[in-house]
């Protein structure tokens, strides 16, 4: 079980990972070369969903690294925690590329690659995670002029049925 008590996210990046091409070819992810800043309420929701995906009773995947040499995902994950902001962004884009290549053998839906680094526990231990979040549709409710209005929402992610992290194929 991963202890996510006192999780503090310091850096966050999000990239779009597309399905393979019609001929089963690699489709380059859409990289977002900037850190993402969430409002406090968004960060609170993100922390809850992350704890749900990675914590006790989650469907997250434990990572066993076969390759640990330079250029491996293991080294890039260390760079996520210990590198500067530009290194974090570069490593996060590399993780999106790795996921897109790992998915070539199956027909996966579009997804977001969420990469984060921060600290956990009272000891403030370094922490990094790579989360694959599938894109979904939903309905949203709001009130306008005293009437209920239902909106169709496209391209949402990190919903309650988040499936956890994908690291076992990123070697």
Image (tube, rainbow, N blue to C red):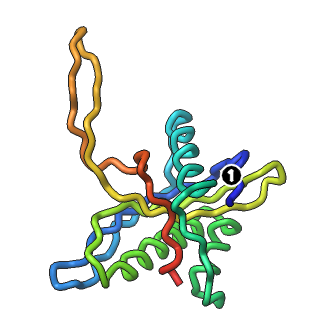
User: In the structure shown, which secondary structural element does the residue marked by tag 1 occupy?
Assistant: loop
Coordinates of residue 136 in the picture (x, y in percent): 29, 51
Q: Residue furthest front?
A: 57
Q: Residue at x 58, y 55 (%)?
A: 57
Instruction: Give the crowd class for mark 1: few <14, some 14-19, many >=20 residues within 10 Å.
Output: some
Front-most of residues 89 and 96: 96
Q: Position of residue 67 (x, y in %)?
A: 61, 89
Name the residue rendered at 48%, 80% in the picture: 169
Decide if residue 118 is on the left or right side of residue 17. Answer: right
Query: Which residue does the image show at 53% across and 55% down from the upper left?
Result: 53
Q: Is residue 170 above or below residue 11?
A: below
The residue singled out by tag 1 in the image is 4
Q: Quadrant of the N terminus?
A: bottom right
Q: Residue at x 67, y 48 (%)?
A: 8
Horizontally, is 29 left or right of 7 in the view? left
Q: Position of residue 149 (x, y in %)?
A: 21, 22
Picture quarter containing residue 116? bottom right
Q: Is residue 148 above or below residue 124?
A: above
Q: Is residue 146 visible?
A: yes
What is the x, y in percent for residue 104?
31, 82
Q: Nearer the viewer, residue 167 or 62?
A: 62
Q: Which of the 4 image quadrants contains residue 152? A: top left
């Amino acid at each position: 079980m991963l202890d996510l008590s006192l999780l503090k996210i310091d850096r966050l990046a999000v990239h779009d990972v597309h399905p393979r091409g019609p001929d089963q070819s690699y489709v380059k992810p859409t990289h977002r070369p900037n850190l993402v800043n969430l409002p406090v309420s968004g960060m609170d929701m993100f922390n809850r969903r992350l704890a749900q995906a990675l914590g006790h009773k989650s469907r997250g995947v434990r990572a066993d690294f076969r390759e640990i040499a330079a250029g491996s995902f293991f080294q890039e994950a260390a760079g996520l925690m210990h590198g500067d902001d530009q290194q974090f962004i570069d490593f996060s884009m590399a993780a999106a590329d790795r996921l897109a290549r790992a998915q070539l053998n199956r027909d996966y839906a579009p997804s977001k690659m969420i990469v984060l680094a921060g600290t956990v526990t009272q000891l403030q231990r370094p922490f990094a995670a790579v989360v694959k979040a599938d894109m979904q549709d939903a309905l949203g409710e709001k009130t306008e002029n005293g009437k209920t209005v239902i909106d169709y929402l496209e391209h949402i992610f990190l919903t309650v049925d988040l499936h956890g992290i994908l690291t076992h194929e990123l070697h």
